[in-house]
Amino acid sequence: MGVLNTLAPAQPTADQGAQRIKRMLAQTFQQVEVTLLQLRQISDRHGPTAISAALGGDAAEVAELYRSLKSVVEKHKQGVAIPDLTIKQ
């Protein structure tokens, strides 16, 4: 006769895993939103090319990245499904 180990940690269910991922994504989107605000403040204080100059990049590319991130954050806030957030390296 086996003894049931009641102290063993329970394995999370698929729903619990999905909820954890949703919380993590919500935190990430909040962080991105704060970063976008900070980037806007830097741009307002130091001029529109300050960020691209600091990064050594093209101002148009930095502006496009900003717009893309802002769009994704806005869609997330509105509850719009974002079809592909695959991170490509």
Image: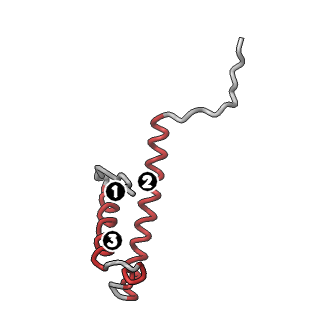
Few, some or many residues within 10 Å of mark 2 (<14, 14–19, 20+): few
Q: Amino acid at mark 1?
A: His
Residue at numbered disc 2: 25
Give the amino acid type for the residue marked by disc 2 in the picture. Leu
Above or below, comparing residue 59 to residue 8 in the picture: below
The earlier-in-sequence mark between 1 and 2 is 2
- Rounded to the nearest whole Å, what is the CA distance between mark 3 and mark 1? 15 Å
Q: Is residue 82 left or right of residue 17?
A: left
Image vertical order of residue 86 relative to residue 52, above or below: above
Which of the 4 image quadrants contains residue 42? bottom left
In the image: residue 2, left or right of residue 52 = right
- Identify which amino acid the numbered label 3 is placed on: Tyr
Residue occupying the point 50% across, 34% down: 13
Q: Judge the density around disc 1: few (<14), some (14-19), many (≥20) Cα neighbours within 10 Å.
A: some
Q: Residue at x 70, y 25 (%)?
A: 5
3 or 2: tag closer to the N-terminus: 2
N-terminal label among 3 and 1? 3
Task: Give the spatial CA distance, label 1 vs label 2.
Answer: 10 Å
Q: Position of residue 85 (x, y in %)?
A: 34, 53
Q: Position of residue 69 (x, y in %)?
A: 34, 65
**Which residue is rendered at x = 46% and y = 64% of the image?**
31
Quadrant into which the C terminus falls: bottom left
In the structure shown, which secondary structural element does the residue marked by tag 2 occupy? helix
Q: Write down the quadrant of residue 9 in the picture.
A: top right
Residue at image position (31%, 53%) is 79
**Labelled disc at residue 39:** none
Please state the horizontal and vertical placement of residue 15, each as a whole percent of the image.
45, 37
- Quickly name the residue at label 3: 66
Secondary-structure class at tag 3 = helix
**Rendering colour mode:** secondary structure
Pointer 1 with pointer 2, Cβ within 8 A: yes
Q: Which numbered mark, 3 or 1, is in the foreground of this view?
A: 3
